[in-house]
Image: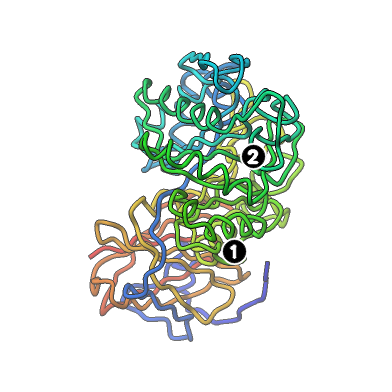
Amino acid sequence: MQRRLRKWALTSVAALLTAAGLTAVGAPDAYAATTATINGSTTYQPIDGFGISEHFGRAAIMNGSQGLSAGHQREILDLLFNRTTGAGLSILRLGIDSGIQPTDPGGPNATPKYTWDGYDKGQAWLARQARSYGVNRFYADAWTAPGYMKTNGTDANGGTLCGLSGAACASGDWRKAYADFLVQYARFYGQEGIGITDIGFTNEPDWTATYDSMRLTPAQAVEFTKVFGPIAHAAGYKVTCCDSFGWDQQKSYSSAIEADATARNYVATHTGHTYASAVDGPLPTSKRTWMSEWSPNGTTWNENWDDGSGYDGFTVASAINDALTMGNTSGYVYWYGASTGATRGLIQMDGDSYHVSKRLWAMANYSRFIRPGATRIGATTGDSNLKLSAFRGTDGTVTVVALNASTSANPVTFSLQNTGITNGTATPYLTDGTHSTAQQPTVAVSGGSLTATVPARSLVTYTVRR
């Protein structure tokens, strides 16, 4: 992270306003301000939303399995999903394991023996809670096929789906049975009033984990897409692929899908993680893309905004900005919203207590204001310390997000071009060491521009309205 000092003089009145994150309205800064152009005629990707997962039993912990009281449970839900006081998340990623059919029914052609407890390790409960906040994007993703469908006979430690090229098994070809299994999982959620929208059949297919995992090459992912795609589409679900361990590694999966006309038509969204490699550009597809899982490295619980640890709030804000502006991602799905112990989640649950990290507010400055259906628009500046993104909502509101990587406050004049907003107001929301998506005094928009100061090492979201 760059920490170059930007030297500039301030009058005493402007200095007081800078402390609040603003410059005087109607009194232009007498010193050279950074200029930025927000151009509504330059359009990029549509936005599907921002989300989290609570897989591997974390949803059950939130539901009170380790002593979290109903009152604190509601406070955590508000922090994650409330659009006024919390992050306003709009995507919930659900983890599919072998739970709905844990034992071999007698072969791939035998009648399935599905079971459903209506709870799914707390995930069905959490989905109902999220829906009550207005969430309607539910992404069900499988870490593995049931072990008896795989070459290694167990849910964990990799293995490949039997029946795919190079994966012959004595038990037979389980490809269609696995496709039916995935759709049945989504149907069980439908019984609970939760409409699954997206289904992924693999998670980190290029990584062998000691827990639930399954290996697929790009060619095998294409092969299974052509089996699963027609079944999923007939049932009304969108197909995602392939949640690779790294963004660069996902490119080989996306390229393979795009090279096959049949598979290309079935995959609606290309998904990649950023553990092995960060976002460095768009995935090789014209379809929508999501950064579908990441949390920064770290060995202790950290609540700080900007401490140079690499897993503070500033790090997360920078990663979200890069995914949106470099990767052109339509969705951004963090890993755990709330977890326990030395988590890099947004919230740490601790018996009947909980702790909130600045990572949550880094997310909130994007997720609360950039709503599903918005479109990213042009946002440019010559200041390399200022990371900018801008979005036009379905209601005509323009949202500008500014991340200041400098150790000095940065006065910025934003020129609003082709946005339909000439005069109006901009409401800033500030996150830094002492503020958490905190509303600041409004700034006037006049003559198609506004001037405001982005405090040092801070994240400010401006909602601009006529």
Q: How many badges with numbers are in the image? A: 2
Q: Tag 1, which secondary structure?
A: loop
Q: Is residue 166 above or below residue 378?
A: above
* Residue 358 visible in rendering: no
Between the C-alphas of marks 2 and 1, the distance is 50 Å
Quarter of the image for residue 195 reads top left
Q: Position of residue 314 (x, y in %)?
A: 61, 56
Q: Is residue 344 left or right of residue 152?
A: left
Report the residue marked by disc 2: 164
Q: Is residue 418 above or below residue 263?
A: below
Q: Is residue 343 visible?
A: yes
Give the position of the C terminus as an image quadrant: bottom left
Residue 129: x and y, percent? 41, 27
- The colouring scheme, among rainbow, by chain, secondary structure or one colour, is rainbow
Q: Secondary structure at mark 2?
A: loop
Instruction: Name the residue rendered at 48%, 55% in the picture.
Output: 264
Q: Position of residue 326 (x, y in %)?
A: 54, 67
Q: Which residue is mark 1?
A: 457
Query: Is label 2 or label 1 in front?
Result: 2
Near mark 2 (Cα within 10 A), the count class, few <14, some 14-19 or many ≥20, is some
What kind of residue is marked 1? Arg
The circle on residue 392 is none
